[in-house]
Amino acid sequence: MRHIISILIENEAGALSRVAGLFSARGYNIESLTVAPTEDPTLSRMTIVTSGTERIIEQITKQLNKLVDVVKLLDLTEGPHIEREMMLIKVKASSMAQREDVKRLADIFRGHIIDVTTSTYTIELTGACAKLDSFIDALAEHKIIETVRSGVTGIARGEKSLHL
Amino acid sequence: MELSGGEILVQCLKDEGVDFLFGYPGGAVLHIYDALYNQEDVKHILVRHEQAATHAADGYARATGKPGVVLVTSGPGATNAVTGIATAYMDSIPMVVITGQVATANIGSDAFQEVDAVGITRPCVKHNFLVKDINDLAETVKKAFYVATTGRPGPVVVDVPKDITDPNIKIPYHYPESVQMRSYQPTLKGHSGQIKRAVELLLSAKKPMIYTGGGVVLGKGSEELRKFVRKLGYPITSTLMGLGAYPSSDQLFLGMLGMHGTYEANMAMHDCDVLIAIGARFDDRVTGKIAEFCPDAKIIHIDIDPSSISKTITVDVPIVGSVPDVLQEMNGLLESSKKSPDKKAIDAWWAEINGWRGMKCLSYDRNSDKIKPQMVVEMIHEITKGQAYVTSDVGQHQMWAAQYYGFDEPNRWINSGGLGTMGFGLPAAMGVQFAFPEDTVICVTGEGSIQMCIQELSTCLQYGLPVKIVALNNRYLGMVRQWQEFFYENRYSHSYMESLPDFVKLTESYGHVGIRIEKPEDLRKELERGFAMKDRLVFFDIVTDQTENVYPMIAQGKAHNDMHMSPYCEPPQDPERELS
Ligand SMILES: Cc1cc2nc3c(=O)[nH]c(=O)nc-3n(C[C@H](O)[C@H](O)[C@H](O)COP(=O)(O)OP(=O)(O)OC[C@H]3O[C@@H](n4cnc5c(N)ncnc54)[C@H](O)[C@@H]3O)c2cc1C
Ligand SMILES: Cc1ncc(C[n+]2csc(CCOP(=O)(O)OP(=O)(O)O)c2C)c(N)n1
Ligand SMILES: [Mg+2]
């Protein structure tokens, strides 16, 4: 099963390598990892997307909690949550037909065209990971020049939160 | 008081109550060595190899329960220390290792003797720190000791760049009384509801089994454990790491379990209906085949580290907490409970266990014309009245020491279980001897292992350490040879030790006493002669039977009831059980 795990970690040099090193040393899956400081500059928030059996996920959360720098952890997938990822995608769009179709698809997916040349469109799209995947699938007829994705971030719905 | 970084480090160690610092100097730590000069509170012990500094500190920690402390230089000093750090990590031993580092401004420039010590040690430390500002130094050292010694203990590395210890930069010194870390708060007290459930389950058992490990020794839980076991009258076994926490001479003790555990301990594990694991981590050398581990048992697990629980074996009643705290609460509940163990069922269970005991699985050929290694260990037990501190290296001799010495007290059996580090024994014995100068400290070793840190004979001379080295010399990397005999059709690929040194002359050249023993009839006399030399290091080079194997043995990945047995044990009393 796919899990989105959020952690608050001391914002110190090497914190990222402790987490990355844990995943590689123990052979855990890592689909994406994002990290940035929070409103409290001494804390970073990391979002890790991983997958595995229940037993492996349990070990992953225990091992992450065991890292001395990890302050708090929340497995977002255990409750209702919002998942978001941002993608920038550059698509070939030279003919009139191409330009219209790409524009139409971007509108359907609520994307924004943020850069235009005579032969390309660059689209910004935000959503759950699966929505970004579908957009790429929808562009099958077109030539994708470049994609860049931020990796997944997320937050719990409602009152629940990950804070000190 | 204004102090330089080097002086601050030394003062921190004093304030922390450190009596011994095991180390080796070099460029990056010269300022610190200068601060060590002309003071006597922290005694610096100069080893001959940084690996030995870490093992000595580790041996000191295992025997005393206090953290071992190490100081090494940058680059090769740090990399040489890594084996000892990893050894301590695998067995959860509290240790603080200070590594020198190149000056802050040179970090990352491939400077002379620069390695990324924090990066190299990250996977084998509990935590590590790079000190980037002299103002953080004292607090970082405090944190290092705090993290190393609390919760599940482990080694902590503090990497100190040379400019931080500059004698010309002085700041006011203050060593914090205590530290708080919002990201690190170990749990000691177990969940009371779970403890109640566990006690109820234990009292309902018909075939209970107690399985204890290194956590009892680490957590100083031996006394509560003894009360607990005696109150219940249930059979108890221990891992290699927990030996001595419960007296091995006691009737309730079934011996060690696992790959080289006793027949009765492993059979009782296989057949039990309630298992309580106390400070043990279900290592693969203990569980054997996971799918057939304690197939009929409900399992209770007490461990201070949540990640040890349900890691390999799923348990029914998890209890996160420290052994003495949790057992004390359990003992209280047992005291006040109206229920008591099911006497009829427990008697029947003991009858079954005593049947297994009847096999006398640790029997060996006592009439051989060759010296049997098991006999050597039994004899040193007699000569030292079971009171010695015994360290070991890794191999067959390690297993024989564990099986035949018979430890009655915790912290007396000191060996590398998790990493299995050859070369551990002698430096570890040095650390123990420093802590207990009046006690007998024995290093049981093999002719292979001893050569991995033999240079420490020189350290032993410098500090007058009267360690007794008992080398079971079988001219083989015996444990490797045994596996090759059992699983590779006697193809002894590179397990033979050729061109051995004359250990007696070698020992003498280091200024110690060497005694070679070749015949069984000389064994007792020569051992007694050597052990009588209280003030001297004696190296016993004992020529043992080359073909002897460690029994019983569960082959890797096999179940507990599937053991290779010694040809000298009694026939099985339960004919339905086939022996391999
Ligand atoms: C050649 C060789 C053969 C071996 N054969 C065997 C064998 O036959 N049998 C055997 O048992 N081992 C054997 N070993 C050792 C084996 O590899 C493991 O090291 C050992 O089994 C682990 O012991 P343990 O479970 O007690 O755990 P340890 O490594 O001692 O771990 C201690 C556990 O206790 C927990 N703990 C620590 N402090 C506390 C506290 N205060 N309160 C509660 N919990 C705490 C820790 O979190 C950890 O889970 C062998 C090793 C070698 C090198
Ligand atoms: C540093 C290291 N290298 C290799 C091994 C693998 N190994 C385990 S036991 C053993 C043989 C040890 O030989 P010896 O010290 O003579 O002991 P014996 O088994 O003969 O009693 C070896 C090579 C190890 N445990 N440690
Ligand atoms: Mg040998």
Image (cartoon, rainbow, N blue to C red):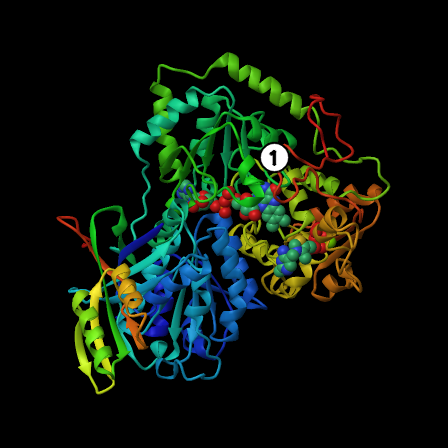
Q: Is residue B526 visible?
A: yes
Please state, as top left, top right, bottom left or bottom right, where the C terminus of chain A lies in the image.
bottom left
- Figure quadrant of residue B31: bottom left
Q: Secondary structure at mark 1?
A: loop
Residue B36, given in percent of the width and then of the height, sits at 43, 70
Tell me if residue B161 comes above or below residue B123 in the rendering: below
Tell me if residue A146 comes above or below residue B257 in the rendering: below
At x 74%, y 46%, the residue is B486
The yes-or-no answer for disc 1 within 8 Å of ligand 1 is no
- Figure quadrant of residue B163: bottom left
Q: Label 1 is placed on what type of residue?
A: His
In depth, the one of A120 and B520 nearer the eye is A120
- Residue sitting at the far top: B344
Q: Is residue B471 visible?
A: no
At x 59%, y 31%, the residue is B265
Q: Quadrant of ligand 3?
A: bottom right
Residue B214, given in percent of the width and then of the height, sits at 49, 43
At x 50%, y 53%, the residue is B90
Residue B525, given in percent of the width and then of the height, sits at 79, 43
Tell me if residue A117 comes above or below residue B70 in the rendering: below
In depth, the one of B92 and B257 nearer the eye is B257
Q: Residues within 10 Å of mark 1 (few under 14, many from 20)?
A: many
In depth, the one of A129 and B229 nearer the eye is A129
Which residue bears the numbered disc 1? Answer: B560
At x 51%, y 27%, the residue is B296
Horizontal side, residue B363 vs residue B291: left or right = right
Residue B523, given in percent of the width and then of the height, sits at 79, 44
